[in-house]
Amino acid sequence: MGRFVQHFDEGIEPTIENLGGKGASLVTMTAAGMPVPPGFVVTTATFDEFMHGTGLTERIGALLQDLDPENVAQVDEVSARIREAIMQQHVPASLDTTHEDSYRVFAARFGGADVPVAVRSSATAEDLPDASFAGQQDTYLWVTGLEAIREHIHRCWASLYTSRAITYRLKNNIPDEGLSMAVVVQKMVNSRVSGVAMTLDPATGDRSKITVDASWGVGEMVVSGTVTPDNIQLDKITLHPVRETIGEKHAELVPEGNALVEREVSPERRAQRCLSDAELHAVAALAKAAEKHYKTPQDIEWALDADLPAGEDLLLLQARPETVHSSKAPAPATKPATSGGWASSLGIKTTPSS
């Protein structure tokens, strides 16, 4: 698709300068064989061409000059003027045609249907050392159709200049020169089952285990603690379950139109484990692969997508380092282990049986 749009699986070099923080991470995971939801990135080259070619860069620079981050009213006024200028500026036809062509290639994977997507800001400053940009730019969910995607790409560009983003950069001495914005367009996951998985026991830090929480529908209810999910612990080497508890799973979030609705789960479905043996094995294997790739214990979010065929429906939504136990070095074994010797030989902390 050229330098203005890059699909996740094009084999491109995933640089933050070109794809922003989120985009580079998604392309990296795709290249590593991890099943992230498919999509494409509208690159920083598109944003730069739009900003420079329309004269917006110079106009914004003048508005930001000598801006006082402590003057909230002034920052809000400048932010509103910048975002309005960006939203009102027509996107050049050459860039707009590239967006359209890329979306049609993407939609063809789903029979040409207007599948709902997430449109996510991916700024080049997201991964700067000692700078947390979480929440500084915008993400839009359940966007459907080419026209709506065009509008929300525009909104993501404008979100580089929200009041909170401007203030953050000013207070942390992060210059606007060279700052750019890519935009990720990624399929929304139609989750029939979802949850989290950790490549250790979160209660003890035992790295010889994988712990899976799973529930019906979209995983937000698991992450927020709204439902009690199924909880299964597996041996990290064999991937065989060693302990499981069937959660109540009393409700589920499911897509309806362009939104999510909460529905009650029937008593029959509450009583059954929401993952088959094969699906549970696949989730555990995915978590283990993420740990191997990132070389540290992982806390992943995953989902089984109802729009995809069995065997291709497990998707990785997010992978992040586990932070509670993994920062501690595994305790060295003081004597040869009589059971679980493989763990000691790998320097993995084991919990002695009573």
Image (cartoon, grey):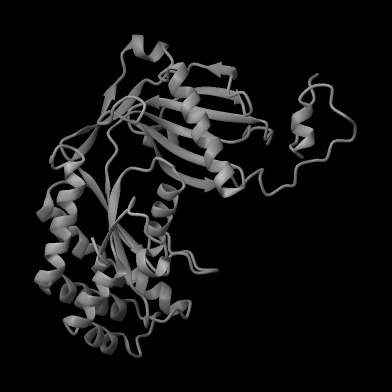
Which residue in the rendered view is the most extreme toward the right?
Answer: 335
Report which quarter residue 232 is drawn in.
Answer: top right
Q: From this view, report whether residue 94 is shown above or below residue 202.
A: below
Query: Can residue 350 be seen in the rendering of this structure?
Result: no
* Most distant residue in the top direction: 268
For residue 1, say whether it is visible. yes
Which quarter of the rendering shows the C terminus?
Answer: top right
Q: Nearer the viewer, residue 74 or 52?
A: 52
The foreground one among 198 and 203 is: 198
Question: In the depicted view, which residue is nearer to us: 76 or 2?
Answer: 2
Q: Is residue 74 left or right of residue 68?
A: left
Q: Is residue 290 above or below residue 60?
A: above
Task: Please give left or right for residue 234 compared with residue 345 in the image.
Answer: left
Estimate the x, y position of residue 263 in percent, counting from the top left. Answer: 26, 24
Q: Taking 17 as reference, is 143 left or right?
A: left
Q: Position of residue 200 (x, y in %)?
A: 62, 35
- Image quadrant for the N terminus? bottom left
Give the residue drawn at x 75%, y 30%: 342
What is the number of callouts on the image?
0
Where does the image place residue 265, in percent across and percent down from the top left?
31, 18
163 and 325: which is toward the camera: 325
Name the spot of residue 56 as percent of width and height, x first. 20, 82
Query: Which residue is at 25% across, 80% downward?
Result: 78
42 versus 207 height, above or below: below
Q: Is residue 229 above or below residue 115?
A: above
Image quadrant assignment for residue 133: bottom left
